[in-house]
């Protein structure tokens, strides 16, 4: 797993090459939600200038919430290091980073703080040193530790506002997610960034809405066995794997591969990784968490494989309009495929307005007496749409006030957005 573990380097060669951090250790303090962060007026002025563009974006109240937060990042590799770094740069002042591993030469292609000078030191210490150069006032709790069920209560203590799961071991990941679920701790989990290369497929969704990703599928199935059917946010890629393969074991490792694992139950074979992909996962996680902490409204799209879907939805909409009676103005179809895509993704976020379902969706009129247009177009499942088309009485007679208010709010949003299309 580690270049320094696999090769017997001479100590003088390490020193001459700048690989001299093996015995490095940093002092550490326990950080919690309530750890005070003290700044002089001059220091506060510097921080305000440093974060000026975030203040302009998130507002004073949002930034106050962000700066008052406490975040725990478990796993400080290619994904976790970027997530932690961007949260710190964005204004998070209390952060705990947890990882048992050290920086290796192979870390330099993806770890945000890895340099030749930090090879051999704990990843969390490499991050902390970098953090202190950027935000010396921040309280950083760097734990050289392996997360597990037996250490969870200690490592996730301190009343965190968010936990970022950047662990690449399946069983450990499940233990973390189970703990957060049982203790009502907000968590976002990174699925597999290895063996992926298409940046346009990186998505954020509830674990129950993921597709195409083998790791997401495995985590989803195992969580169901633990009684967890959803409610956990994940960043994942819908890119189909298979373009590259795991690196083969050396001939000397094949008889007893477990002997070469960095720890028991951890993988031995190396996953090929483009350094950009873990960074994208980490930045996506960091962005999602900071907007949540700041109370800034975002709603990730539940995106599936789409062009054929938009064309099908446009055909189905046309067929529904053909059946529209003269009492409701007869057939009217002024929406093309791009309009259908716009309504599905931008207005309805890829979900049914009635149930929030993401499968077997279709578009149709919301109010039958009004013309068919983007201002009167709702997304439902096909079964819901069939019932909607046969409603007797008004919408108020058939739907709750919450559903009606939700649909009308989204359609008002569409009227505003349509002026900018």
Image: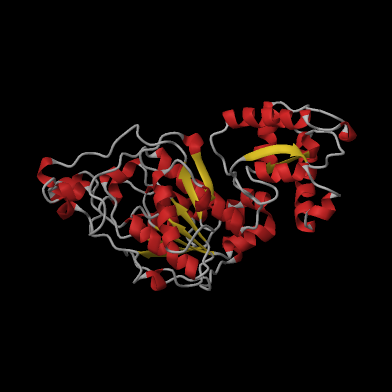
Residue 46 visible in the current orientation? no
Measuring from the top left, give residue 387's x and y in whole percent.
73, 45
Give the quadrant of residue 411: top right
Residue at image position (60%, 41%) is 360
Residue at image position (69%, 32%) is 340
Q: Quadrant of the C terminus?
A: top right
**Does residue 52 appear left or right of residue 182 in this picture?**
right
Residue at image position (76%, 40%) is 414
Query: How many numbered marks appear?
Result: 0
**Does residue 111 appear left or right of residue 228 in this picture?**
left
Measuring from the top left, give residue 390's x and y in whole percent.
78, 43
375 lies above or below 157:
above
Measuring from the top left, give residue 215's x and y in whole percent.
39, 48
As drawn, the residue found furthest toward the right would be 327
Q: How is the image coloured?
A: secondary structure
Please tell me which residue lies in front, 126 or 340: 340
328 lies above or below 133:
above
Measuring from the top left, give residue 292's x and y in whole percent.
60, 56
Please tell me which residue lies in front, 411 or 353: 353
Please tell me which residue lies in front, 291 or 268: 268
Residue 152 visible in the current orientation? yes
305 lies above or below 138:
above
């Amino acid at each position: 797993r580690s270049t320094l573990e696999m090769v017997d380097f001479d100590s003088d060669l390490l020193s001459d090459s700048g690989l001299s951090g093996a015995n490095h250790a940093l002092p550490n303090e326990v950080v919690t939600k309530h750890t005070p962060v003290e700044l002089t007026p001059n220091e506060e002025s510097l921080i305000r200038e440093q974060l000026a563009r975030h203040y302009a974006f998130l507002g004073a109240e949002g930034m106050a919430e962000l700066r008052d937060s406490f975040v725990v990042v478990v796993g400080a590799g290619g994904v976790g290091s970027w997530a932690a770094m961007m949260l710190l740069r964005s204004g998070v002042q209390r952060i705990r980073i947890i990882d048992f591993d050290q920086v290796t030469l192979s870390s330099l292609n993806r770890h945000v703080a890895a340099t030749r000078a930090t090879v051999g030191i704990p990843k969390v210490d490499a991050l902390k040193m970098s953090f202190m150069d950027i935000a010396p006032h921040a309280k950083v709790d760097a734990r050289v530790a392996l997360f597990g069920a037996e250490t969870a209560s200690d490592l996730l203590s301190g009343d965190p506002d968010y936990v970022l799961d950047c662990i690449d071991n399946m069983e450990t990941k499940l233990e973390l997610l189970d703990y957060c679920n049982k203790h009502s701790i907000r968590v976002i989990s990174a699925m597999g960034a290895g063996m992926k290369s298409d940046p346009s497929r990186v998505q954020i969704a509830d674990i129950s809405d993921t597709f195409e990703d083998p790791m997401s599928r495995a985590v989803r199935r195992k969580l169901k066995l633990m009684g967890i059917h959803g409610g956990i946010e994940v960043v994942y890629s819908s890119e189909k794997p298979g373009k590259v393969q795991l690196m083969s074991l050396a001939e000397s490792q094949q008889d007893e591969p477990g002997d070469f694992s960095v720890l028991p139950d951890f993988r031995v074979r190396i996953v090929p990784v483009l350094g950009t992909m873990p960074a994208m996962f980490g930045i996506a996680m960091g962005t999602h968490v900071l907007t949540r902490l700041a109370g800034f409204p975002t709603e990730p799209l539940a995106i599936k494989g789409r062009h054929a879907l938009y064309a099908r939805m446009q055909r189905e909409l046309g067929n529904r309009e053909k059946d529209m009676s003269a009492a409701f103005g007869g057939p009217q179809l002024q929406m093309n495929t791009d309009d259908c895509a716009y309504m599905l993704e931008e207005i309805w976020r890829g979900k049914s307005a009635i149930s929030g379902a993401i499968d077997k969706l279709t578009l149709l009129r919301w109010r039958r007496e009004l013309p068919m247009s983007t201002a009167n177009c709702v997304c439902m499942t096909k079964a819901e749409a069939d019932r909607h088309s046969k409603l007797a009485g008004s919408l108020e007679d058939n739907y709750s006030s919450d559903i009606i208010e939700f649909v009308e709010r989204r359609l008002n949003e569409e009227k505003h957005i349509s002026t900018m299309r």
